[in-house]
Amino acid sequence: MFKLPNLPYSFDALEPHIDAKTMEIHHDKHHQTYVDKLNEAVKGTEFANMEIGEVLKNISKIPQDKKQAVINHGGGHANHSLFWESMTPDAKKKEFKGKIAEEIKKTFENFENFKEQFTKASLGIFGSGWTWLVVNSDGKLEIISTKNQNSPLMNKLYPILGLDVWEHAYYLKYQNKRMEYIKAWWNVVNWKKIEELFKEAKK
Ligand code: MN3
């Protein structure tokens, strides 16, 4: 059975950038619902005992009547698990450096360019979805967007940074101002974690 992971910090830890009430509802209610519905969908199947990443990589093997539920709720579970980990109240101590910084500069020329492209992709999503920094099958970095809770893992892309642009992620504090939310979010990105995930992805 899949379980809701604990937040690695308190609900108010990302204030003022992300408010405590949003974090509480987002983690305890939204993410919990993805976990519950995923468990419902895979109950009694071999997929119930797999890692969520493995389930999503093998999405084509999921029986047709359960497939969309696993895409939605399995994706929701995987995406949010990464989202919590990729933010930190100690962003200043976990700044942009190391191998991932080198690779981003190599791919996007400089950090500002990368940020601009990532932000543009996030603003360009119509409706609900995510923007990702992924490592592709050639080991190269790419910025992509996905709709709803579709996980990059279903397309053999390994996500190392993800931004949730569903309104539930920001509406309480930022209402319709997605740009303000994105700007604030950059202040809490955990580059140390992204570096770890990048090294894992390269293996
Ligand atoms: Mn969300």
Image (tube, rainbow, N blue to C red):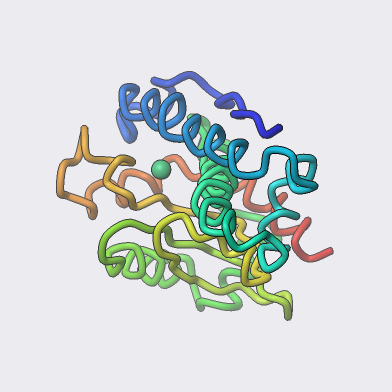
* Residue at the front extreme, as displayed: 65
Determine whether 102 is above or below 7 in the image.
Answer: below
Percent across and percent down for residue 70 are: 58, 52
Image quarter hosting the C terminus: bottom right
Q: Is residue 148 above or below residue 138?
A: above
Give the image quarter of residue 3. top right
Left or right of residue 106, residue 182 in this image: left
- Please report the residue visible at 78 percent of the width from the left and 56 percent of the height from the top: 200
Q: Quadrant of the N terminus?
A: top right
Residue at the far left: name it.
Answer: 176
**Residue 172 location (% of width, % of height):** 21, 33
- x%, y% of residue 124? 28, 69
Using residue 44 as the reference point, say whether residue 70 is left or right of it. left
- Rendered image quadrant of residue 123: bottom left
Picture layout, residue 92 above or below residue 7: below
Residue sitting at x 51%, y 78%: 109
For this view, does 97 lie left or right of residue 203? left
Total count of labels: 0
Residue at horizontal 44%, vertical 40%?
A: 188
In the depicted view, which residue is nearer to us: 183 or 2?
2
Q: Is residue 132 above or below residue 6?
A: below
Q: In this orientation, which residue lies closer to the viewer: 143 or 190?
A: 143
| Residue 203 visible in the shown view | yes
Residue at 52% across, 34% down? 88
> Does residue 94 appear in the picture of this structure?
no
Dividing the image into four quarters, tell me where ligand 1 lies: top left
Q: Give the image quarter of residue 11.
A: top left
Q: Position of residue 145 (x, y in %)?
A: 44, 68
